[in-house]
Image: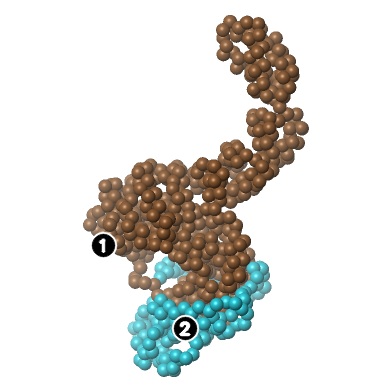
Chain colours: A brown, B cyan
Amino acid sequence: MSSMMASTFLRSIQNHPLMLYPAALFIRKKVVLYCTMKSTESQTATQEKQNPRIKVPPRTQTITTTNNVSKDYEAVIGIETHVQLNTLTKAFCSCPYNYGSPPNTSVCPICMGLPGALPVLNSKVIEYAVKVGLALNCKLSLNSKFDRKQYFYPDLPKGYQISQFDVPIATGGYLDLDLPMEFGGGHWKFGITRVHMEEDAGKLLHSESGSYSQVDLNRAGVPLLEIVSEPDMRTGIEAAEYAAELQRLVRYLGVSNGNMQEGSLRCDVNVSIRPIGQSQFGTKVEIKNLNSFSSVSRAIDFEISRQVQLHSQEKGDQIIQETRLWEEGAQKTVTMRKKEGLADYRYFPEPDLPGVILTKEYVDAIRDSLPEAPEMKRRRYEKMGLSMQDVLFLANDINVAQFFDATIAKGADVKLATNWIMGDIAAYMKNEKLTINEIKLVPRELAELIASIKGGTISGKIGKEILFELLAKGGTVKGLIKEKDLVQIVDPVEIEKMVEKVLAENPQQLEQYRGGKTKLQGYFAGQVMKVSKGKANPGLLNKILLEKLNAKS
Amino acid sequence: MRMGMGSCRALLMGRAVAATASASIQKTQVFNFSRKISSNSFGLCFSKSVLITCRNNNGVRSCSTASIRSSLEPPDVPRLAETARISLTQNEVEEFAPKIRQVIDWFGQLQDVDLHSVEPAIRADTEGSNLRDDVPETFENREAMIAAVPSFEEQYIKVPKVLNKE
């Protein structure tokens, strides 16, 4: 399932009109990027020096900004991502959390905020936060704490959210990613401002007609990590790729299923524009309700166009600090609420929970057990000599990457294994709507299949037949070859007999061939192959056939 | 302080007045949280070899106050009411203002206590690790909890429609 979702995303982006971006734009970006890579500590400073690079074509018919206008502005984009941790229980109580359970079935006095109930922190929440902090190259706070963020809304019955405010568990990191080739490629580093732990709120359903709302508290108290990026992104595509890489990372780490449709990974983006050359940021607008990577990309590009248009019409003052909602149907953002000054959350340290203290030993133990991150995997695949397109495909989904790694570990040729996985296996998965973990083929047998073809035991054509058998029914390559008697015929005497039989059965064609119609060689080769049931070694077959055809001429 | 927080835990839309009082306490910054905090006062040690870093984040925390004020600002009752999502008539505003003022002044007396040599007690001391294993347990008395919800319909808790969050 997950692999399909990831590849679906890749496809949907590929089909996107954004791929029509002028190539020159991206070449310039790469240069800028290079500077950023050299000094990650001073990303903000680097940003200020960046060249003009925004050139956003209009995304919909309603917006008619021309490229000439948008060339004078650059967008500044930052993303807040909420990642729901896949712990078995909630953050502060032992209620199990399963997406899709009947409403209000997984609740207790703690997550319902009943008076007197006290929270007790789930140890996995800290473990997962440390994992993510380390994987994002952050500095960890060995001594952090929880704070109360007060807000009065029925999705949080306590009247406050337990969160982290001034001392988050991790700060100052970065995320590496490789932009797909169709967007110009290039290696990118986006800054991470902070990572903090907090609890999720319940779900509210607003009745269409009635004057009431319905509350489901199953999700209240489920652990989240809020990951805040530096304002390092400049286009919708960059932001979507950042989010996709975060999803990849949390899946690789096994801390979240990263599923956007279920709300396990939620992105809020902040977009502002400024005239090129201006160092201070413009008024930022927050966009919510983005539940796919393509909506992240399209909402941002729409918002940039909207703001550029207002600026170009001398209506820049109409850009106000507000929260806007992305409307998928209309493909536009609309005002959700205007910010009346800064929200007063009245933060203070959570008195019901002890501070969060990490020891160096604890952090080191987690660091030592971290799995290979997507970035490390991509660099390793690159060193194996694979093209960037191959690298991105294989590393996109942790399960595909693990399948590939296991195949290679069984001694399979790197490029051949890549071709089989990206070709026939991926096509089969797509057609059957299966993930790589659901197919019956195991890495050991793929390695065996590749070796059998390479070693000449079976032909490539037979190999393909066996592959589909293995994909659908499982079994072993050796077993199938034996069972179906598929071993390639490499005995020249046996092939010669077949050639002679075919020549004897086709005297007319033989005469034509010898009369100069040499194209008929293909016909004879096909007939011999048919007689051999596809098992004759093609090279040997052609060599013997040619000898026989030309023998009496 | 525990009392203040407890009363703030209003189930859904209830206890608005308590929330109002609590809000005013926060707003007038009675407590000083941002002085030196040593981790000795925290529990949750993974080991004894933890180093102690003192963080002083004055100006960041909303509830910090650098200097002691002897007189506190009068409460802005209409604003507090808005924060607590309740509507008050002008008469009620006039009636509540002195009462809330009284509570604040009472807390204000605490401002006069010299605490410069005292470490802030943010929370009760807990010895050792206070973490829980990630093992699910179903709360057994859910029915009683749900029965106490003022309005429960078709598996959902029913509340007045609230669309504006902040």
Say if residue B86 shows up in the picture. no
Q: Residue at coordinates 40% horizontally, 56% vertically from top-left? A: A36
Instruction: Say which of B93 and A540 sits in front.
Output: A540
- Residue for badge 2: B36
For discs 2 and 1, the disc positioned in front in the rendered view: 2
Tag on residue A229? none
Q: Residues within 10 Å of mark 2 (few under 14, many from 20)?
A: some
Q: Residue at coordinates 35% horizontally, 68% vertically from top-left? A: A339
> Share a chain, discs 2 and 1?
no
Coordinates of residue B44 in the picture (x, y in percent):
59, 77
Instruction: Say which of A19 and A411 sits in front.
Output: A411
- Residue for badge 1: A317
SS state under label 1: helix
- Check the residue under mark 1 and report the chain it is in: A
Coordinates of residue A261 in the picture (x, y in percent):
52, 55
Q: Is residue A287 left or right of residue A213?
A: left
Q: Is residue B147 above or below residue A315?
A: below
Coordinates of residue B41 in the picture (x, y in percent):
55, 83
Q: How many labels does the image show?
A: 2
Coordinates of residue B62 in the picture (x, y in percent):
41, 78
Q: What residue type is labelled 2?
A: Lys
Marks 2/1: CA–CA distance: 43 Å
Say if residue A552 shows up in the picture. yes
Q: What residue type is labelled 1?
A: Asp
Question: Which quadrant, please, contains the C terminus of chain A?
Answer: top right
Q: In this view, does A89 lie above or below A64?
A: below
Q: Residue at coordinates 39% horizontally, 60% vertically from top-left? A: A43
- Check the residue under mark 2 and report the chain it is in: B
Q: Residue at coordinates 71% horizontally, 13% vertically from top-left? A: A501
Q: Residues within 10 Å of mark 1 (few under 14, many from 20)?
A: few
SS state under label 2: loop
